Image (spheres, helix red, strand yellow):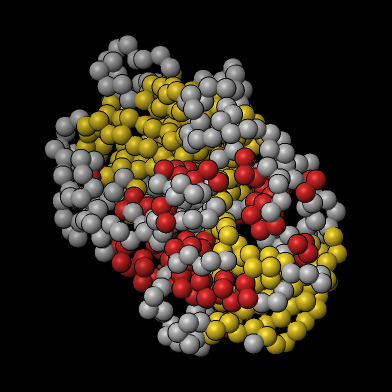
């Protein structure tokens, strides 16, 4: 039943076919850059009718929806957004856009589509839907909503889904139920997999992420994850979706500073994809934090102008192709489109990482230098302390935002590099640009006077003005180097080779900049602290750790350099 009709004049984004990005490539083309549109067309005034509705579910419950119908006398495809964070937010944002005479968000592509926003079962206007948790899973709610939309007289029978984070996860749940009229999904900053390494990097809990779960109402999930600190089998077979069973195109959208590594999401999706749609899966990765995906705004301490324009064009192209059957090149578009930090340009490749990437090593030297030349002599190890009562603080990185904690690219000088318990290694000023595309690796020779400790690394881009901007970070718990299934404590004083890999990144160190590696034993609250003890429930100890970098211990920063 539909009720409460309202009519608004919305300012839509008129991204016409003629303004969509050209394909610029053919399947199998090599790594190449992509043009960024200079601007979007002027906003188009579009009259939308806004209805409220209660959509019946198969188990008798009803979900509250807002339906935005363009002022057209013909059937149109629909974009579905299912949210646990209040569908009214979209109405508020649209009205504000009207008042400011600004284009609305990219999910409202003019009068070509109807848009349906739905509150999840048990949330906001769907709070009375019972049972609060459906026995056959949230995907069945998605199935019922998709099929209800397809039956409406204003819909042409084609439905796609859009949404960020949890709104992306529900897309994966829904696609697994195979609603006949769902033709494409676009999950932003979301993952369909539930593996151990998603929550524990190098065996260390991503503490700030779990704290965020507590803040936004997902505390029960965070509690379960904290209860399984080892890869004990709990995370097996708990994925939200399985690629071989996805039979419609997926456009994955991610950010270099997001919680999730979208290159891993896409590669696993592509590797196991159903042959029916394997060639049509795509990924777009921008310079975004989790809550800034697709926007042209401040991300951390840097701005990336124009990044939103590319995304809005590609989004419209994807929807137009699969919902409106427009031959606009989307079917032949590059599989991977990504934003190269530093250059502030979009690049394309058929794989991630791009073919031809080679490792370039920068060796740690006794004088704090990073150099491509191996150290040729013996040198005394350098000491860094792990003090749980005085951790090296988190500044930037891949977290969810909260008051007092900056995320994304951020200057490390004041709170991190000036901390007494860190070691810095910096390259000479670069005489030419150095691009990297892939996962940064660090190999370090380390010993400790405790049976366990952590090694945390950060890689930064040092600007000519001295700013040391974080690109990527990671960590490794030494007791979980051999196996993440059980602890294997280290021998005091023994030297170990520690290998650490970061979240994927695409960035260019520009001429005149320098490369820096920061080594410490903590990055808190991004990662949980180590007590440096055998029994993690016993009082914490201070660990004195040593880093070796000489002719016999070739500690190095390993950068993935593409062949352009």
Q: Is residue 461 above or below residue 65?
A: above
Q: Is residue 303 above or below residue 69?
A: above
**Residue 353 can be seen, yes or no:** yes
Return the residue found at the far top: 376
Q: Quadrant of residue 511?
A: top right
Residue sitting nearer the eye, 148 or 224:
148
Q: Is residue 260 above or below residue 520?
A: below
Q: In the image, what residue occupies the spot 62% across and 79% down?
A: 65
Q: In the image, what residue occupies the spot 63% across and 32% down?
A: 26
Residue 207 x/y as whole percent: 37, 57
In the image, taking residue 115 as reference, residue 348 lies left or right, namely: left
Q: Is residue 107 above or below residue 392?
A: below
In the image, taking residue 184 as reference, residue 75 lies left or right, namely: right
Residue sitting nearer the eye, 542 or 495:
495
**Residue 462 can be seen, yes or no:** no
Residue sitting nearer the eye, 510 or 551:
510
Q: In the image, what residue occupies the spot 53% across and 66% down?
A: 180
Quarter the N terminus occupies: bottom right
Residue 39 x/y as whole percent: 79, 45
């Amino acid at each position: 039943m539909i009720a409460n009709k309202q009519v608004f004049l919305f300012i839509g984004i008129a991204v016409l076919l003629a303004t969509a990005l050209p394909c610029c490539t053919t399947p199998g083309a090599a790594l190449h850059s992509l043009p960024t549109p200079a601007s979007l067309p002027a906003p188009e005034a579009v009259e939308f009718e806004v209805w409220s509705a209660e959509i019946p579910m198969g188990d008798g419950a009803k979900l509250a929806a807002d339906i935005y119908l363009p002022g057209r006398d013909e059937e149109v495809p629909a974009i579905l957004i299912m949210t646990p964070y209040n569908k009214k937010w979209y109405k508020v944002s649209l009205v504000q856009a009207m008042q400011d005479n600004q284009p609305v968000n990219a999910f409202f592509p003019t009068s070509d589509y109807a848009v349906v926003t739905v509150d999840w079962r048990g949330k906001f206007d769907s709070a009375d839907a019972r049972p609060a948790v459906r026995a056959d899973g949230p995907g069945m709610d998605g199935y019922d909503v998709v099929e209800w939309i397809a039956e409406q007289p204003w819909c042409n029978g084609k439905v796609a889904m859009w949404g960020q984070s949890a709104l992306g996860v529900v897309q994966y749940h829904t696609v697994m139920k195979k609603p006949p009229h769902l033709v494409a999904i676009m999950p932003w900053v979301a993952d369909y997999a539930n593996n151990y390494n998603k929550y524990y990097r190098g065996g260390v809990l991503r503490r700030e992420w779990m704290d965020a779960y507590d803040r936004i109402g997902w505390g029960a999930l965070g509690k379960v994850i904290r209860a399984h600190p080892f890869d004990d089998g709990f995370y097996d077979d708990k994925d939200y979706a399985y690629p071989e069973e996805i039979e419609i195109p997926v456009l994955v959208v991610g950010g270099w500073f997001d919680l999730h590594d979208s290159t891993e999401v896409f590669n696993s999706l592509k590797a196991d994809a159903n042959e029916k749609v394997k060639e049509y899966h795509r990924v777009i990765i921008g310079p975004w934090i989790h809550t800034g995906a697709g926007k042209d705004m401040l991300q951390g301490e840097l701005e990336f102008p124009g990044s939103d324009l590319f995304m809005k064009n590609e989004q419209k192209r994807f929807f137009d192709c699969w919902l409106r059957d427009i031959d606009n090149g989307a079917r032949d578009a590059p599989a991977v489109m990504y934003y190269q930090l530093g250059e502030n340009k979009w690049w394309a490749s058929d794989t991630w990482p791009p073919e031809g990437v080679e490792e370039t090593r920068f060796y740690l030297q006794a004088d704090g230098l990073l150099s491509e030349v191996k150290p040729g002599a013996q040198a005394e190890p350098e000491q860094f302390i792990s003090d749980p009562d005085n951790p090296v603080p988190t500044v930037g990185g891949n977290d969810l935002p909260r008051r007092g904690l900056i995320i994304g690219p951020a200057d490390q000088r004041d709170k991190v590099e000036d901390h007494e318990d860190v070691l810095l290694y910096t390259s000479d000023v670069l005489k030419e640009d150095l691009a990297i595309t892939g996962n940064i690796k660090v190999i370090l020779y380390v010993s400790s006077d405790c049976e366990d400790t952590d090694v945390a690394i950060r890689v930064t881009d040092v600007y000519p003005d001295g700013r040391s901007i974080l690109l990527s970070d990671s960590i490794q718990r030494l007791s979980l180097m051999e196996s993440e299934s059980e602890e294997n404590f280290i021998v005091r004083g023994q030297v170990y080779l520690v290998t650490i890999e970061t979240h994927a990144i695409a960035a260019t160190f520009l001429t005149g900049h320098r490369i820096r590696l920061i080594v410490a034993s903590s990055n808190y609250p991004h990662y949980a602290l180590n007590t440096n003890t055998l029994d993690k429930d016993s009082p914490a100890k201070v660990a004195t750790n040593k880093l070796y970098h000489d002719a016999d211990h070739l500690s190095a920063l390993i950068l993935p350099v593409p062949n352009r």
